[in-house]
Amino acid sequence: MFLILAKLSNQDIPDDELVAAIFSEASKRSEAYSPPPWVLSGHVDLAGDTSGAQQLSRSVHISTKLMTEGKTDQLIFLMGCTLEETCHLAATYQSIVPVSSSGGQLALLDLSAPLLFRGRKRYYGCKRCSEAALREPSNEGMQMIDEKIIAEALGVQLLQLVLLMKLELQDATDTLDVFLWKHAELFFSVTAEDMSANQEAQNSIHQTMDILCPAEGSMGKRPWLDLCLMAYYTEGDGSMNQTCYQICNTVIVKPSSK
């Protein structure tokens, strides 16, 4: 049995302030551009704020193929919107790809921002392994367009969200640093994707960690756990290998509330 002494941190999800700044900067660009031949361009109206401001209009671009198939709500390319406005429109359209003007052409935003919005979910692309370009997605033979089809068409490798923690365990003999990542979703009974967009899922993880690692509790208040650990080796400097440990095949069962 092991006792968790301290928690470090789970891998940070992208910061909304940074994302909002990227959207704000892109929304201010007003250079002329030529849309690709496969899109139809139009505008979407946003309601003004509570001060009585008039409606705002933003540019949208829709695939001509989707238009002819009557699937205009499945995917739009949205231009000139702030992050808040984009999130608002994500409740209406199934998929939104933010775009801006660059060099006289339509282009995707910097991949530090979400590539795609689907409802409350945001999808990010890998900067190192993507060859991003604005292209028309094809849904030939498929009823619905999903995030994989869109990312493949745009030349983007989607990032996979993971939960990552480093914990310090103690038993009667010693302490041990261990990682929790491959089986973190099993451990918490929460997916990383849900955690990135769902406050309830985030709260569930925080509550579990508060039980395992009371902020100001004595050692006696920390629960003893039966854990499965896996040891593996990583290459170190020179010919030295390092032994690492990972929590696996373990599920936290919370006490039922009375």
Image (tube, rainbow, N blue to C red):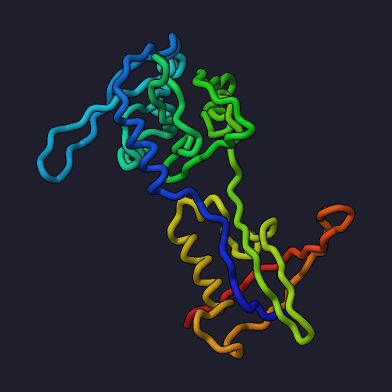
Answer left or right for 218 relative to 171.
Answer: left
User: How far across and how far down the image is residue 194, in percent?
Assistant: 51, 53
User: How far across and how far down the image is residue 87, in percent?
Assistant: 36, 41
Q: In the rendered image, which quarter contains the N terminus?
A: bottom right
Question: Can residue 250 be seen in the rendering of this structure?
Answer: yes
Q: Residue at x 12, y 37 (%)?
A: 53
Q: Residue furthest top?
A: 37
Of residues 151 and 142, which is closer to you in this image?
Answer: 151
Question: In this rendering, is residue 245 above or below 257?
Answer: above
Answer left or right for 195 relative to 248.
Answer: left
Q: Residue at x 85, y 58 (%)?
A: 241
Of residues 232 and 254, which is closer to you in this image?
Answer: 232
| Quarter holding residue 131 | top right
User: How far across and how far down the image is residue 247, in percent?
Assistant: 72, 66
Counting labels gives 0
| Quarter holding residue 43 | top left
Question: Can residue 89 be seen in the rendering of this structure?
Answer: no
Q: Residue furthest front?
A: 238
Q: Residue furthest left?
A: 52
Of residues 13 and 103, which is closer to you in this image?
Answer: 103
| Quarter holding residue 190 | bottom right
Q: Residue at x 71, y 67 (%)?
A: 178
Q: Residue at x 49, y 21 (%)?
A: 134
User: How far across and how far down the image is residue 108, in percent?
Assistant: 46, 26
Answer left or right for 214 relative to 70.
Answer: right
Question: In this rendering, is residue 169 above or below 11?
Answer: below
Answer left or right for 119 relative to 227.
Answer: left
